[in-house]
Amino acid sequence: MLGSGLLQGLKVTAKNIAGSFHDPERLVTVEYPEQKTKLPENYRNFPFLVSENATDPMGTLRCVACQICEKECPPQCIYIEKSKDKKPDAAGKMQVYPAVFDIDTSVCMSCQICVEVCPFEAIKMDQVFEIATTDRFNALLLDRNQLAKPNSYYHQIHPTEAAEVDGRLLAERKAAEEKAKAAAAAAAAKAAAAAAAPKPVATPTATAGAPGAVAATVSVAKPATPPAAAPVSATPPAAAPAASPAQNAPASDGKAAP
Amino acid sequence: MSNSGLEFPAPVGGSHVAAVHDPFHGDLLEVSMGPHHPSTHGVFRMMVTLDGETIVKLKPVFGYLHRNHEKLGENTSYLASMPYTDRLDYLNSMTNNWAYALAVEKLAGQPVPERAEYLRVILAELTRLLNHVCLAGFLLQDTGASGTPLMYAFREREKILDLFESLSGSRMMCNYQRFGGCRVDASPEWLAGAKHITDNFGRFLDEYEELITGNEILMARTQGVGALSPELAISAGITGPMLRATGVDYDLRKVDAYGVYSRFNFRVPLGDHGDTYDRYMIRVLEMRESITILQQALRDLPAGPIMDPKAKIRGFRPKAGEAYGRIEGPKGEIGFYLISDGSPNPYRYRVRPPSFVNLTVLEDMCLGQTIADAVIILGSVDIVLGEVDR
């Protein structure tokens, strides 16, 4: 009968209207600013820089300004300048740090390539999406002070991923330590075998480059002498770089291996 | 030229209609539909020449969304092109990723673990569902069913997008496939969610068909409108549902059997007339086949790694050579042609977009139809301007 298809369709519409009052499968919207859905853990938005310590974010950035992300970034929204000096990273190794690290979030397309190519787990994706602003240029150009967020925040937004990353970093650090220790032991054995050498070469000055030269006892003293004291150039808030090596848990001598 | 002494304008754009010489007949009218026209699915323009309400000439004008995609691909590394492929056909980023990953894997001789192949199939079929459900909604919007079917379609699409978001981190710009596998592994909860959606999708399709397929107005508007002959479709290089609606049995999932598609049991629906109604029905039937593929893939999904351990993220340089990777996207054959000279960037990067090629026969389908039909014929071609203009 002509029109029966129309009536059948209207029946479906009526079912949906009625269903939208009680069936969650048919009513899937929320009243946004008041109500918010929970973001999935994998949700990504814009990158941030991970720092080890919440109290001194600039002093404990994981980033070593290797500029791989700057090269790989598809829309080229990252700008990095290397520092002239070095300061110790979480493992106590002397590293270059970013003197300038800018991300233009108006250009960023949230693709996560920077996170994937970073060998130091230093840049991760944030979940803050309510960043609309009336300022078109400066408000969206984030410098390293705005980008730095502590590792605890990373644990908060991506718990499983952050735990995995921490485990991997710890394992890497341990492996480096073992290797250094083994090398040191081998060197010590060699020195002993050299039959009554007058004096072992293990002076604290030789620590940085040559892992084999240092015995384990000497290395404890090493982090206490931060060379050149890492002048965190022109960062008004929390410029206390001297505090940084204190929280380096393992007092490893120069994990020079990787 | 006419004996009444009236001056007729020269035929517009080279078209020639005999009736113009009749003094009682009106002039031809050239209408520019678009680029900002709600029926043109983005920034697409149809220069339509009308004789009354009948189309005598149609010239597609595009390029308003041109973003230099291919040249960008030649100036960035292989990996950095991956997020750009999301933006080609922005409804189906998962299949775009897959086609590009397939091309690069062919180029570099990179194997893919089995679990990743299954995940790719699952995501590609979910993408097919959401693309076709969008098309069905928009096509009905074009016929004048304002809102209701589109809203129901988008409701279902949203559920799939939530799945994509919880897996890849983004609803539409997934950037999920990598050379040699996938980026993130699917958790058991995610797979349970995918299974829930797959199982319920059939019920939604039943309801949707009840709502619209038997509708007399839809049949009157679409049956016999915009018919495409199989000969023309083949010679113009049409692929995907539009080709199968004309009755040509050509589906890359069967022809190439890329990935693990040879392990699944599914049928390829074919049309009879190649008209707009067939093109709509093909999509509905394909969704039903996608559900059966999804059920098989979710059932058989093996455990194991999702990324080949030898795959390189940094410093990826395939050896010199060329490769063409193609898959059956929801809109048709999406292919990437790459030439490598051994450097980190491709020497040549070329996209074969399905909806661009499918758009080439628009004039042939529209000639002799009314202007209102041109809107639904365009809707049934299923274009996305991000892909047409690149």
Image (cartoon, coloured by chain):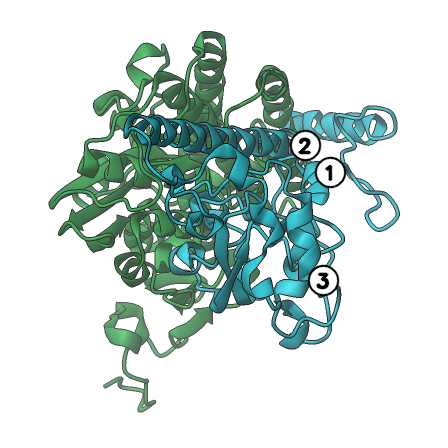
Chain colours: A cyan, B green
Position above or below: B281 against B148: above
Residue B220: x and y, percent? Answer: 52, 38
Q: Amino acid at mark 2?
A: Pro
Q: Earlier in the sequence, mark 2 or mark 3?
A: 2
Marks 1,2: beta carbons within 8 A: yes
Asked if marks 2 and 3 fall on the same chain, the answer is yes
Which residue is rendered at x = 27% and y = 44% of the image? Answer: B316
* Disc 3: which residue: A240
Marks 3,1: beta carbons within 8 A: no
Residue A247: x and y, percent? Answer: 68, 44
Residue A153: x and y, percent? Answer: 72, 44
Few, some or many residues within 10 Å of mark 2 (<14, 14–19, 20+): some
Position above or below: B288 against A83: above
Q: Earlier in the sequence, mark 3 or mark 1?
A: 1
Q: Real-space Cα distance between discs 2 and 3?
A: 29 Å
Q: Amino acid at mark 3?
A: Ala
Position above or below: B380 against B279: below
Q: Amino acid at mark 1?
A: Gln
Q: Which dot, 3 or 1, sits closer to the camera?
A: 3
Few, some or many residues within 10 Å of mark 1 (<14, 14–19, 20+): few
* Disc 1: which residue: A156
Left or right position of B188 against B55:
right
Which residue is rendered at x = 68% and y = 32% of the image? Answer: A159
Q: Which mark is residue B326?
A: none
Q: Quadrant of residue A164?
A: top right
Pick out the residue farthest to the left.
B321
Q: Quadrant of the C terminus of chain A?
A: top left
* Disc 2: which residue: A159
